[in-house]
Amino acid sequence: MTTLLQVKGLSKSFGAVRAVSNIDFTIREGHCVALLGPNGAGKTTTIRMITGLLKQTSGKMEFQGAAEGVHYRSLIGYLPQSPSFYSWMTGSEYLIYAGQLCGLSAATAKLRAKALLERVGISGAAKRRIGSYSGGMKQRLGLAQALVHQPKLLVMDEPVSALDPLGRKEVLELLRELKQETTVLFSTHVLHDAEVLCDDVIIIRNGQVALQGAIDRIRENHRKPTIELQVEQDEHSQRWMSTFSRRIQSLLNEKDEGALFQDVQLQNGIARFTVSEMDAARRMLIEELAREQVKVSRLEVGHTSLEDLFMKVVTG
Amino acid sequence: MSSETKASPSFSVANPPLSSSMTRYRVMVEKELLELVRSFKLLWVPLVFILLGIMQPVSTYYMPVILEHAGSLPDGTVIDIPLPQAAEVLAQTLQQFGTLGILVLVLVCMGSVSGERNSGAASLILVKPVSPLSYVGSKWTAMLMLAWGSLAAGYLASWYYTGLLIGAVPLSKVIGSLLIYGLWLTFVVSITILFSSLLRSPAAAAFSTLVGSVVLSLLAGLFPKALGWNPGALSGFASQAVVSEISDSGKFGLAILVVFIGMASAVLAAAGALRRSSAVE
Ligand SMILES: Nc1ncnc2c1ncn2[C@@H]1O[C@H](COP(=O)(O)OP(=O)(O)OP(=O)(O)O)[C@@H](O)[C@H]1O
Ligand SMILES: [Mg+2]
């Protein structure tokens, strides 16, 4: 599959603040890519540079199929974090206007506007002033205007963050259809959105890429066995639980790569151990529990999820 | 992992040819005009000018009557104010346009660029294959249409009522001074749009323009020899053109040249400011 957009060493500073520093990634044609990161990670800044709205401090972006010397803007559709329109126009007028600015003839723009309004589900409000639209309707109109010229790359900044659960589900459904037709890059701070839609993720933190790659591969590579342990409320068992976790914690601080226990989290009386080797860890744990006569209420074997990895990457 | 090759839309955009940029520019001007219609600016701005234009001859004509009925004068006072020359009334009308008229125009233009940038509406437009120059140019064009239309309506109304109440002025003189005065308004509108692109606050843009235009006019009035060629002198030239003749055609020609250079640079500079950072949000 060919590369559509290649970003090399992209950086942006606002005065002393380095919002984005030295980001590299590629977007391949037909892929759906999520730019994932917590608030203030630099998602919007990165996206604005890709769309050409913001000039980068350094670095470059190469777009496949863009003519020499012309910005590839005409090949992208862009939906900002909170789109704003001309409130005195109607939804349909705005779409026709957007289409004409993208080089469509008046007649084609009209046809496409009608079809898109239908598609994003606001054809009922097509003749109403945008000023009277709700936030969700504006988001949909924003999506429609980004699609009006059939862009090669659809770039969206947090397309579903402002929506209620129902609207979110509908828009995600729409995006799932859209990614069959075009290449998609969108930012989000919710891992779930990336998981249901995307082929690739780029996790950024403090303006730097923390982790990137195909989402399946990441899930595979970073999957570690875990043991969840819960004990009864009696004093002896609870005391054992806290001393044991503390002991593991102090072992962890020695940073031994080959250690049996890689991580421990104690939350609501449930201890969650990330281990390197399941059988050995399980044996060791059960022996310990039997010797100390701890009243186990639950012992469950599982795997770390992508969510765990995400939390670790963005907080660690 | 989806591996099917996705049908990429059959849509290619090369360097947009000139004709298509012209189409876009036209579409954008139409949008600006529609905005002026929907916000009723295309209605009330000309109305203000027409009102100002009619007020001048009417109030001049009825001034003696008004004073008589004011009642503060002792009985038997004979009021005898000589009616001014018809052309002078028109020159006074231009003075009205120079204060209230310019104020209204500046207020209408002050947020034309910064408003859209602040709201974020501009960034949605500027990511499209639209050049900042045509974006600014379309606003400039629409505002100039508004300014020239309002000026013509107001000035011709003034000429009509002057003709009815005071005396005739040859239409050719009126048109001449209208064109000269229009250049001054053109200059002011261009500067407003420039400030609207440079400054985030519409009020600051209006303030800067108003101060700038007052300073230019004062300079032209105070130092006619040294600075009589600056655009601020044009309102004076317009008055001269309707009352008598333009005395210093050298300075007049220079002022026109300066206006044209000034407005071209203003529009280019505004486009440059947008290109540097298209979206201040
Ligand atoms: N115009 C600006 N001037 C100064 N600093 C800025 C500007 N824009 C962004 N920043 C800084 O850059 C960093 C990244 O901001 P950005 O908006 O890209 O984050 P984000 O990932 O989109 O966050 P969110 O999820 O909240 O939208 C932040 O620390 C922010 O304060
Ligand atoms: Mg953001």
Image (spheres, rainbow, N blue to C red):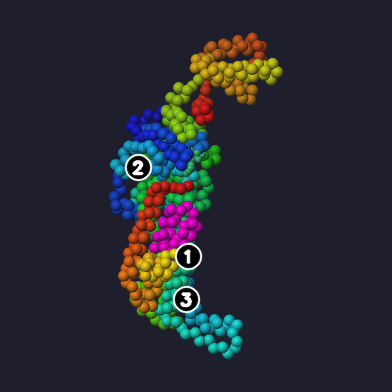
Q: Chain of mark 1?
A: B
Question: Disc 3 residue type?
Answer: Gln
Q: Residues within 10 Å of mark 3 (few under 14, many from 20)?
A: many
Q: Position of residue A149 (x, y in %)?
A: 37, 45
Quarter-of-image position of residue B231: bottom left
Gap between marks 3 and 2 measured at Cα = 56 Å
Q: Position of residue A125 (x, y in %)?
A: 49, 50
What's drawn in magenta, residue-wise? B187-214
Magenta stretch encompasses residue B204: yes
A22 horizontally vs B14: left or right: right
Q: Which residue is mark 3?
A: B56
- What whole-number distance in Å separates the C-alpha atoms at marks 1 and 3? 18 Å
Taking the view exactly as shown, the residue that stands out farthest to the bottom is B76
Badge number at residue A139: none
Q: Do the residues at discs 3 and 2 belong to one chain?
A: no
The residue shown at (47%, 25%) is A219
Amino acid bearing label 2: Tyr
Q: Which residue is mark 1?
A: B103
Classify 10 Å Cα crowding around label 1: few (below 14), some (14-19), many (20 and above).
some
> Disc 2 designates what residue?
A72
Q: Is residue B101 above or below residue B193?
A: below
